[in-house]
């Protein structure tokens, strides 16, 4: 399903399908993970197995039907992507954990992927989205990436804006749901899970790149928490040492 086209007509934004899903993972594997600050901080970029576990997280998110790709109209190539993951507030008084906590415990085997997921869980907890905004379901916008040769053309903004619009539409049911079979044989091992049916009332994001921070600012996201990679340690070294600069990651949210 095509949602919009760039002003120059070169790119279209559409929901991820079985046909474009492999291309979306290629963008994450080859262009996002090697350049993204948090992935570098926790050495996911150095560990192919950890990177594959992050791709499994993308696959799980794609099942919610809120993930998108940007396609080059001339070549048909997927050149950018973003994944939307629905999360429900744990039942009051229960010991139920967040989706990211469960994913880390059940499906992350590598120290690098565990480190990255623990970082995401910690920043989400600091933001305290559910209680701060009084909502019971949100859509986390994550793994926003663009192929290097197609950057600085507004694709990240188009993807993020469309992701927010799709989250708003979810009240009428899943927009473009995928099945495990749609993900291909590499993900046939995944178990079916109960789909989230509550409509999200909030979009959230963990912005670490200049581009994603700018997208959030333009679209009206409120920055709730800021963490400096200079204050975080992994394998006995400050995370900023691996990044090569002291930069930050923002936890941001937009009520929808």
Image (cartoon, helix red, strand yellow):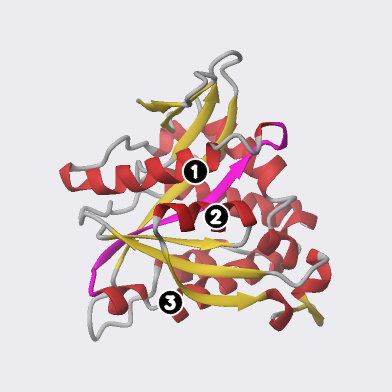
Identify the residue shown where x is 55% and y is 76%. Answer: 226
Spot occupied by residue 215 in the image (x, y as percentages of width and height): 50, 51
Marks 1 & 2, CB-CB < 8 Å contact: yes
Label 1 crowd (10 A; few <14 / some 14-19 / many >=20): some
How many residues crowd around disc 3 within 10 Å: few (fewer than 14), some, or many (20 or more)? many
Q: Name the element at disc 2.
A: helix
Q: Quadrant of the N terminus?
A: top left
Tell me if residue 26 is in the magenta stretch. Answer: no
Magenta range: 134-149
Residue located farthest toward the left when viewing the structure as drawn: 172
Q: Earlier in the sequence, mark 1 or mark 3?
A: 3
173 and 3: which is toward the camera: 3
Task: Compute the Cα span from label 1 to label 3.
Answer: 23 Å
Local secondary structure at mark 3: helix
- Residue at the image point whose x is 23% and y is 76% from the top: 91
Disc 1 designates what residue?
Answer: 157
Q: Nearer the viewer, residue 18 or 250?
A: 250
Quick check: is 140 in the magenta stretch? yes
Pointer 2 with pointer 3, Cβ within 8 A: no
Estimate the x, y position of residue 245 in percent, counting from the top left: 79, 68
Q: Which mark is residue 127?
A: 3
**What is the CA distance from the residue labelled 2 to the residue labelled 3?**
19 Å
Residue 242 circle label: none
Q: Nearer the viewer, mark 2 or mark 3?
A: 2
Q: Pointer 2: residues within 10 angstroms few (<14), some, or many (20+)?
A: some
Q: Position of residue 126 (x, y in %)?
A: 46, 81
Q: Helix or strand or loop: what does disc 1 sit on?
A: helix
Residue 91 visible, this orientation: yes
Residue 214 image label: 2
């Amino acid at each position: 399903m095509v949602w919009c086209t760039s002003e120059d007509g070169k790119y279209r934004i559409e929901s991820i399908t079985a046909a474009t899903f492999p291309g979306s993972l290629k963008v994450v594997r080859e262009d996002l993970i090697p350049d993204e600050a948090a992935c570098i901080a926790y050495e996911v970029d150095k560990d192919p197995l950890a990177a594959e576990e992050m791709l499994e997280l993308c696959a799980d998110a794609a099942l919610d039907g809120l993930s998108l790709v940007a396609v080059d109209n001339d070549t048909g190539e997927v050149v950018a992507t973003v994944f939307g993951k629905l999360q429900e507030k744990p039942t009051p008084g229960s010991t139920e954990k967040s989706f990211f906590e469960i994913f880390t415990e059940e499906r992350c085997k590598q120290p690098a992927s565990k480190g990255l997921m623990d970082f995401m869980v910690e920043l989400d907890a600091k933001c305290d989205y559910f209680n701060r905004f009084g909502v019971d379901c949100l859509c986390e916008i994550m793994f926003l990436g663009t192929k290097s040769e197609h950057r600085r053309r507004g694709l990240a903004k188009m993807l993020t804006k469309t992701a927010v619009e799709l989250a708003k539409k979810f009240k009428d049911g899943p927009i473009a749901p995928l099945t495990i079979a749609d993900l291909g044989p590499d993900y046939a091992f995944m178990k079916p899970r109960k789909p989230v049916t509550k409509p999200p009332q909030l979009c959230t994001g963990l912005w670490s790149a200049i581009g994603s921070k700018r997208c959030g600012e333009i679209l009206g996201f409120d920055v709730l928490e800021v963490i400096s990679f200079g204050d975080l340690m992994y394998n006995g070294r400050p995370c900023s040492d691996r990044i090569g600069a002291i930069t930050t990651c923002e936890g941001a949210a937009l009520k929808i």
